[in-house]
Amino acid sequence: MLRLKNLHFSIFFFFASLQLSAAQNVAQRLIHADSLFEIHSFRKATLAYEQILKTSPRISPTIYLKLAYLYEQKKDWLQVQYYLNLYYEQIPDERVLRKMNEIARDQGWKGYELDDFNLLILLFKQYSGYLIGLFLVIGVYVFAVLLSKRVKHQYIPFRHKMIFFFYWAGVALLVNLPGRYRQAIIRKEGSILRSDPSAAAPPTEIVKEGHRLKVVGKSDIWYQVLWENQLVYVKSSDVWIVR
């Protein structure tokens, strides 16, 4: 038994050491990339930051802002928009939202409008944690009240049980909503939107790069997206998915 415990400890220590070493390696590479950024060695800094993202995607979202700035120096507006979207998905900021809208307006891209829906999404991203927490507290309180009545053998109307059930169903939907809401940016010039998820399906429209579409679903290598109030399909290799 003692030998087994020692083995478990050794395995845990081995993997912990690997994770610590990887974290230190990423930190060193990040310091190097930041130093390149500070001395305006933009090409090398871009390569360094993007290499870090390839190996360590869960990194500070400020890297996305730096990459957006670096690509803005090269007037590569598609990449600027992509990295601003990635930053915005983690740090919802109205200034970033307006910057994306400004770029899209200048480039003639659709899907970045400052309409009521996008502003509502912004508010939800900013305050969803507080809102969900409030609903959870209310739900737990109501559950405690109903449980207390049950223990005391008090009558609980059926409609109260149904309201409680649908309340929790709504909370579950609210919790899972951010993960289900996805958007895609067209990354290839002349991407073909089709009526069905097949290369043999007739094209509905050929669009240029930069447009942003709402993702509804996925079928094999095709994303079902909403474009001009129509459900169409686009090949997954033609888009970047931002969450």
Image (spheres, rainbow, N blue to C red):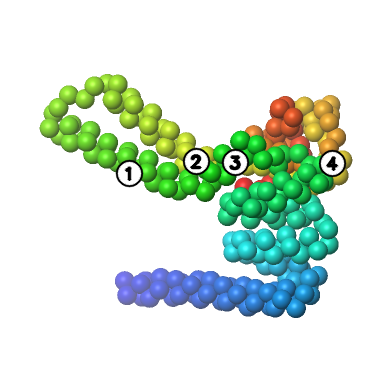
Residue located at (32% from left, 40% from top): 138
Quarter containing the N terminus? bottom left
Q: Earlier in the sequence, mark 2 or mark 1?
A: 1
- At label 1, the amino acid type is Val
Element under disc 4: loop
Label 3: which residue?
119
- Viewer-nearest of labels 4 and 3? 3
Residue 119, given in percent of the width and then of the height, sits at 60, 41
Dot 2 alpha-carbon crowd within 10 angstroms: few under 14, some 14 to 19, many 20 or more: few
Label 1: which residue?
137
Taking 23 as reference, is 86 left or right?
A: right
User: Height in image: 87 above or below 16?
Assistant: above
Residue located at (23% from left, 33% from top): 146
Question: Observer-nearest residue: 165 or 14?
Answer: 165
Q: Earlier in the sequence, mark 1 or mark 3?
A: 3
User: Height in image: 187 above or below 12?
Assistant: above
Report whether residue 163 is seen. Answer: yes
- Mark 2 vs 3: CB contact within 8 A: no
Residue 163, given in percent of the width and then of the height, sits at 34, 26
Label 2: which residue?
176
- Mark 2 vs 1: CB contact within 8 A: no
Label 4: which residue?
208
Element under disc 3: helix
